[in-house]
Amino acid sequence: MKETGSNARRKVEESPFVAQGSPAVRIEDDYYGWLLDQASVLRHHRHSSLDWSNLAEELEAMAAAERRELLRRLTTLLAHLLKFQYQPEVRRERSRKLTIVRSRTEIKRLLDYSPGLKGQLTEYVAAAYADAKNDAGVDIRLERHQWEQLFPVTCPWTPEQIQSPDYFPPMGSSEKS
């Protein structure tokens, strides 16, 4: 039976067969085990045993995952703002408001946890808006040419409005910015 968690970490740390200067576990063989091994190596300041190249790649991948998560959450928020404004239905208003509020909460939490993402928020909003238009158009059953005519070309809301817990676009407005 394969050891996991703290037992696996203890085995890696205590193993007399760990060669100095190379990782005890190869990333190609066991990603999870490799992560635990590299964490142990860092904690014990055994710099010569670090897998520098793969660590750098993994750190960059982690940063990219944070960006993708922000883009995904912004896309959801913007799509619901579009649907709220351009397809007003009293029966869906409560549900859409709830999704908008939850999305804002998740985005705030993500930005609080990773404030480095805030510096490019305007660019992320612009990128997410393109996907949000498509998502909203599909959801309200419009053909591409219809939603391209209905929705503004660029995001009509500022980053401040998007993040404001009190802001909701006017319902039923079909003015294109």
Image (cartoon, rainbow, N blue to C red):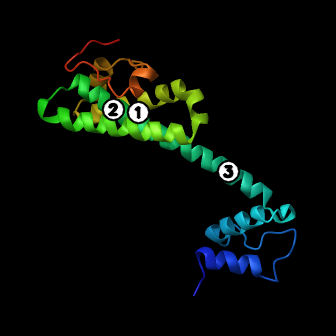
**Residue situated in front as seen by the camera: 27 or 62:** 62
Q: CA distance from mark 2 to mark 3?
A: 30 Å
Q: Earlier in the sequence, mark 1 or mark 2?
A: 2
Vertical placement of residue 123 versus 16, above or below: above
Check if mark 1's residue and mark 2's residue have beta carbons within 8 Å.
Answer: yes
Q: Residue at x 32, y 25 (%)?
A: 166
Vertical placement of residue 27 versus 52, above or below: below
Q: CA distance from mark 1 to mark 2?
A: 8 Å
Decide: few, some or many residues near mark 2? Use Cα within 10 Å; few <14, some 14-19, many ≥20.
many
Left or right relative to 131: residue 93: left
**Residue situated in front as seen by the camera: 92 or 39:** 39
- Dot 3 lies on which element? helix
- Name the residue beneath numbered marker 3: 59
- Name the residue beneath numbered marker 2: 79
Q: Earlier in the sequence, mark 2 or mark 3?
A: 3
Check if mark 1's residue and mark 3's residue have beta carbons within 8 Å.
Answer: no
Name the residue furthest bottom.
1
- Name the residue beneath numbered marker 1: 131
- Dot 1 lies on which element? helix
Vertical placement of residue 84 versus 8, above or below: above
Q: Earlier in the sequence, mark 1 or mark 3?
A: 3
